[in-house]
Image (spheres, rainbow, N blue to C red):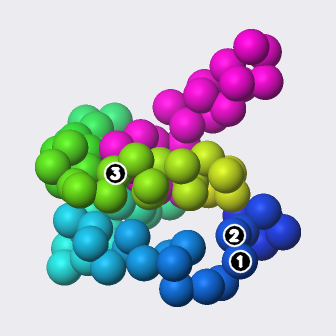
């Protein structure tokens, strides 16, 4: 579960980027895997999610949000949890 202590203040300006997300009208299952999903099926689902993120006008805001709160699930800003964790680790090391 994401730590709510790291969430930005719940003010409209902070969250307004979500209204412009390419994912807004998409089934959330595209971005979040079922518990037992593995292998090719997971890679296909993540590829579909990342394809939507690639054309999203708020991709960077979404990614920064996910990194700030250390979102533990799903594809956010075009990256899955493992990719986001690598960015966080690199930021700590550098």
**Badge 2 is on which residue?**
8
Image position of 86 (left or right of 33)? right
Q: How many marks?
A: 3
Contact flag, marks 3 and 1 (Cβ < 8 Å): no
10 Å neighbourhood of mark 2: few (<14), some, or many (≥20)? few
Nearer-the-camera pick, 49 or 41 = 49
Can see residue 72?
Answer: no
**Helix, strand or loop at mark 2:** loop
Q: Are marks 2 and 1 in contact (CB under 8 Å)?
A: yes
Task: Please report whichever mark, 3 or 2, sits nearer to the chain's N-terminal start.
Answer: 2
Vertical placement of 21 versus 71: above or below? below
* Mark 3 nearby-residue class (10 Å; few <14, some 14–19, many ≥20): many
Relative image position of residue 36 (x, y in whole percent): 46, 55
The residue located at (54%, 43%) in the rendering is 81
CA–CA distance in space, label 3 to label 1: 20 Å
Which residue is pictured at 70% across the width and 24% down the height? Answer: 91
Question: Eyeballing the image, is 38 above or below 1?
Answer: above
Mark 1 lies on residue: 9
Disc number lying in front (3 or 1): 1
33 part of magenta stretch: no
Q: Is residue 22 left or right of residue 69?
A: left
Point out residue 44 in the picture as x, y percentages from the top left corner.
Answer: 20, 43
Left or right: where 15 falls relative to 9: left
Residue carrying label 3 = 59
Residue count near mark 1 (Cα–Cα under 10 Å), binned few <14, some 14–19, many ≥20: few
Say which quadrant the C terminus sits in. Answer: top right
SS at mark 1? loop
Residue 85 percent location from the top left of the image: 63, 34
Check the picture and name the quadrant holding the N terminus: bottom right
Range drawn in magenta:
72-94
């Amino acid at each position: 579960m994401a730590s709510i202590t790291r969430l930005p203040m719940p003010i409209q300006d902070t969250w307004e980027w979500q209204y412009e997300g390419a994912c807004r009208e998409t089934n959330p299952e595209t971005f979040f895997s079922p518990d037992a999903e593995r292998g090719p099926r997971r890679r296909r689902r993540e590829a579909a999610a990342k394809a939507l993120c690639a054309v999203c006008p708020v991709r960077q805001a979404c990614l920064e949000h996910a990194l700030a709160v250390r979102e533990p699930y799903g594809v956010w800003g075009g990256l899955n949890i493992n990719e986001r964790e690598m960015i966080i680790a690199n930021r700590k090391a550098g």
